[in-house]
Image (cartoon, rainbow, N blue to C red):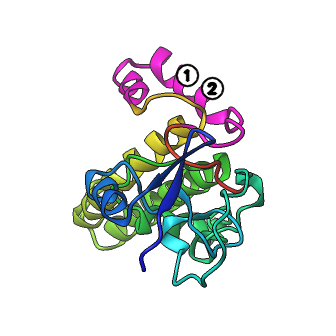
């Protein structure tokens, strides 16, 4: 028999919801792969993407939500490293709905600079000029993930991704965004998901 589910919204437990309602919430985007969920038989809350088959257990209320006690997704365990930040950015190529840590953001900025310089050098060596085909291709490939990781970093500081539009204001907007990107993560879950691991 299918068991009811509970899910977390801003640190609060919602439920029980039937499996059918749960599926509808997933389809509508209310529950995402990083939303903390629980049902009978699970020891603790887990992101939906990490849930599997559960064992039967006697009926009991869900445990209290402790987002800091939740195990990290192994696929994103190294996302705060130099190489891991690049993998994470491309794994979440157009993810504008979740969060990214300060280190994920700044490591990806460094990757963007390195790749841009390497592309310019290759263009120069091949006689294509400073903004040749390779540089244009690299810029095109990095365009969407750069915006996505910047928006996720804003979410991590508790701000809407629309703040990214400050980039359209030369100098002043850029300075404000740099200040935002340097700030610490909001502790605990917010409306864009659980706190990323640092």
Residue 8 lies in the magenta-colored region: no
Question: Counting other residues with Cα less than 10 Å from the Cα at mark 1, is it few (<14), some (14-19), or many (20 or more)?
Answer: some
Percent coordinates x, y for residue 155 in the rendering: 51, 37
Left or right: residue 90 compared with residue 128 = right
Please tell me whether mark 1 sits on a helix, a strand or a loop: helix
Q: Quadrant of the N terminus?
A: bottom left
Residue closest to the eye, 84 or 30: 30
Percent coordinates x, y for residue 149 in the rendering: 46, 49
Q: Residue at x 67, y 61 (%)?
A: 80
Q: CA distance from mark 1 to mark 2?
A: 6 Å
Q: Quadrant of the C terminus?
A: bottom right
Judging by the rendered image, the residue that carries numbered circle 1 is 175
Taking the image as drawn, is residue 16 in sight?
yes
The answer to whether mark 1 and mark 2 are in CB contact below 8 A is: yes
Please tell me whether mark 2 sits on a helix, a strand or a loop: helix
Residue positioned most to the top:
172
| Viewer-side label of 1, 2 | 2
Q: Image quarter for residue 125?
A: bottom left
Magenta-colored span: 162-190
Residue closest to the eye, 192 or 111: 192
Percent coordinates x, y for residue 55 in the rendering: 60, 85
Judging by the rendered image, the residue that carries numbered circle 2 is 179
Q: Residue at x 65, y 78 (%)?
A: 57
Q: Residue at x 40, y 22 (%)?
A: 166
Q: State the predominant SS element of the stretch in magenta.
A: helix
Percent coordinates x, y for residue 82 in the rendering: 65, 66
Left or right: residue 162 compared with residue 156 = left
Left or right: residue 188 compared with residue 31 = right
Residue closest to the eye, 46 or 171: 46
């Amino acid at each position: 028999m299918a068991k009811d589910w509970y899910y977390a919204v801003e640190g609060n437990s919602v439920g029980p919801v039937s499996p059918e309602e749960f599926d509808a919430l997933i389809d509508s985007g209310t529950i995402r792969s990083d939303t903390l969920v629980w049902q009978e038989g699970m020891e603790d809350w887990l992101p939906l993407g990490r849930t599997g088959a559960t064992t039967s257990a006697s009926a009991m209320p869900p445990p209290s939500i402790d987002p800091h006690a939740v195990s990290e997704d192994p696929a994103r365990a190294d996302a705060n490293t130099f190489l891991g930040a690049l993998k994470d950015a491309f794994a979440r190529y157009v993810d504008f709905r979740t969060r990214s840590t300060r280190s994920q953001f700044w490591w990806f900025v460094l990757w963007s600079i390195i790749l841009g310089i390497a592309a310019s050098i290759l263009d120069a060596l091949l006689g294509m000029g400073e903004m040749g085909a390779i540089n244009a291709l690299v810029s095109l490939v990095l365009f969407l993930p750069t915006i996505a990781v910047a928006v996720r970093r804003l979410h991590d500081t508790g701000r809407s991704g629309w703040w990214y539009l400050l980039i359209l204001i030369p100098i002043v907007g850029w300075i404000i965004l740099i200040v935002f990107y340097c700030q610490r993560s909001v502790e605990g879950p917010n409306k864009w998901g659980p706190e990323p691991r640092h």
